[in-house]
Amino acid sequence: MATQTLDRPAPGSATDEDNVLELKNVTKVFGGGIMRRNLTIAVDNVSMGVPKANPGITAVAGESGSGKTTLARLMLGIIPPTEGSILFNDRDVATLSRRERTEFRREVQPIMQDPFEVYNPFYKVDHVLMAPVNNFGLARNKSEARDLVVESLETVGLRHQETLGRFPHQLSGGQRQRIMVARALLLKPRIIVADEPVSMVDASLRATILGSIDLLNKELGIAVIYITHDLTTAFQISDNILVMYRGSVVETGRVEDVIQNPQHPYTQLLVESIPRPDPKERWGRDMASQETGSDVSDVGCRFAPRCPFVMSECTVEMPPLYRTGDTQAAQCYLHREGSLGDVMSVSDVFKSYA
């Protein structure tokens, strides 16, 4: 299988050692057992790096079942990889000492999809904010701890007078989600992994939450991995993007290039599924059959059963990533004959822009 890599370092400074967090040929398989039946390859041979210098916002996009959330859980250390390794400051997460794992948990923070799941309904929201302050020794006394919490809430656009002292059910979904952003901010992490952070809030609140996430990156220098199925919001706040399909990265590059000029048939399908403001313009394109699960072979290109351009080799072997532009690469045999040639790693693609 082709190795898929994302690195976005500053121009001229790209090395593997420059990554805070790095995934190397990571595969995650669920199921199996003695008879190895009903195996599900959730993430298939994915490599990516989060650089120490010039951290950006990287979107990981795809439909349900593409492996986005599994990739997020791997990055957070919630689940171990079946194959490959996850490195934090050049140390394998699986071998971290207790002190190093505490540092890892502070430096790599989650913002989960459902803000209500992380709250204990019997505790006021103050508890979810004070817990990290106490657990990581962020303050010397209660007064200093409260000041930290108030500052964090104000950073994400919440007034502490209207937030603290309330139970989760007394706040809106948008407020609960922004509290989770504030909680992550308290720890001043290097990386935030945001798994569908706006999918369960009203459209009117999405801009506010996305603005808070953008603030963390632009003003505080926190790298953000933004997991989403929504290409519109990915285009709005991200610097670069990985498009996943059934565990594989099928296209990657600068977000403007990938969304405005998609090169993989699956990315084209995603882009064409975005509703258009013109009612006369056709929404979407008829694609081939929509097989999923066991109906789809794990040999060759995962998208082949749905692809209108499928060729014989597509069902035999997984295509590598082919460079399709200075800041773009696609995992598709359609680009095999392109003048830009075959790329096994796309790190060089991202060296062309900061």
Image: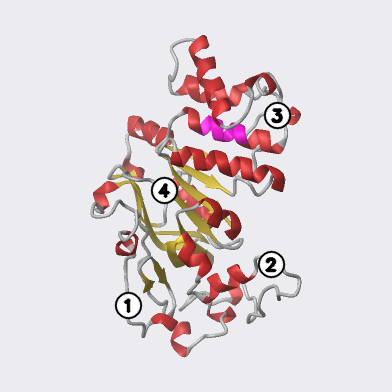
First in sequence: mark 1 or mark 4?
A: 4
Disc 4 versus disc 2: nearer the observer:
2
Where disc 2 sits, the SS reads loop
Residue 197 horizontal/vertical position (percent): 60, 45
Could you tell me the amino acid type at mark 4? Gly
Q: Classify 99 as above or below 300.
A: above
Find the distance from the CA under tag 1 to the CA under tag 3: 53 Å
Q: Label 1 to label 4, Cα distance in Å?
A: 26 Å
Q: Position of residue 254 (x, y in %)?
A: 43, 61
| Residue density around tag 1, few if under 14, some if 14–19, many if 20 or more, within 10 Å | some
* CA distance for labels 4 and 3: 31 Å
Q: Going 55% across and 35% down the picture, which residue do you hit?
A: 181
Front residue (pair 184, 103): 184
* Residue with the most extreme bottom position: 312
**Cβ–Cβ below 8 Å for labels 1 and 4?**
no
Q: Earlier in the sequence, mark 4 or mark 2?
A: 4
- Count of labels in the image: 4
Residue placed at 24% from the left, 51% from the top?
A: 13
Mark 4 vs mark 3, foreground winner is: 4
Q: Earlier in the sequence, mark 3 or mark 2?
A: 3
Q: Nearer the viewer, mark 3 or mark 2?
A: 2
Q: Which mark is residue 56?
A: 4
Q: Residues within 10 Å of mark 2 (few under 14, many from 20)?
A: few
In the rendering, at what x and y percent does residue 138 appear?
Answer: 44, 20
User: For mark 2, what is the residue?
Assistant: 276
Residue identifier under label 3: 168
Find the magenta span and give its range: 178-184
Is residue 116 visible in this depiction of the protein?
A: no
CA gap, disc 1 and disc 2:
32 Å
According to the picture, the residue beneath numbered tag 1 turns out to be 340
